[in-house]
Image: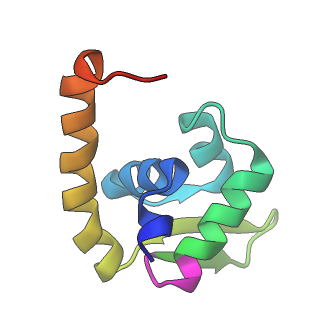
Amino acid sequence: MLYLLANKWSTLIIGALEEQPHRFGELQSRLQGVSPKVLTQTLRKLEDFGFVDRTIYPEVPLHVEYALTDIGRGVATPLAALRNWIEVNLDKIHTT
């Protein structure tokens, strides 16, 4: 479970969905650099573990939205704190 929540894209997806539900294309635009394959895989894992809910609207064209579940909203707060800490301390972190 920790590997999923510690994943860069999982953290960013949960952060993007904090505000409101998004369609796949909206998420991909917002999360620049994520490939469609990785976005699909990550959304499926988040859905499998109960963090994200996928709703299909039977319209033409088909409309699918992703939203945080209650447990997804619960984990969003500590993940936001971690993202904020990283942003504040990024210049102090040594990478090799």
Magenta span has 48?
yes
Q: Which one is nearer the viewer's eye here, 26 or 10? A: 10
Residue at 45% from the left image edge and 60% from the top image edge: 21
Q: Exactly how many numbered labels are in the figure?
A: 0
Find residue 51 and report its image quarter.
Answer: bottom left
Residue at 48% from the left image edge and 53% from the top image edge: 13
Q: Position of residue 77 (x, y in %)?
A: 20, 59
The answer to whether residue 2 is above or below residue 80 is: below
**Magenta stretch?**
47-51
Q: Which one is nearer the viewer's eye here, 46 or 64? A: 46
The colour scheme applied to this rendered structure is: rainbow
- Residue sticking out furthest to the top: 91
Residue at 66% from the left image edge and 54% from the top image edge: 24
The answer to whether residue 86 is above or below residue 44 is: above
Please tell me whether the stretch drawn in magenta is mainly helix, strand or loop: loop
Find residue 83 and report its image quarter.
Answer: top left
Is 3 situated left or right of 29 in this image?
A: left
Q: Position of residue 78 (x, y in %)?
A: 20, 59
The N terminus is located in which quarter?
A: bottom left
Magenta span has 10?
no
Is 88 situated left or right of 41 in this image?
A: left
- Residue sticking out furthest to the front: 96
Q: Which one is nearer the viewer's eye here, 51 or 61? A: 51
Residue at 32% from the left image edge and 56% from the top image edge: 18
Q: Position of residue 87 (x, y in %)?
A: 26, 28
Q: Position of residue 7 (x, y in %)?
A: 50, 55
The answer to whether residue 28 is above or below residue 56 is: above
The answer to whether residue 87 is above or below residue 75 is: above
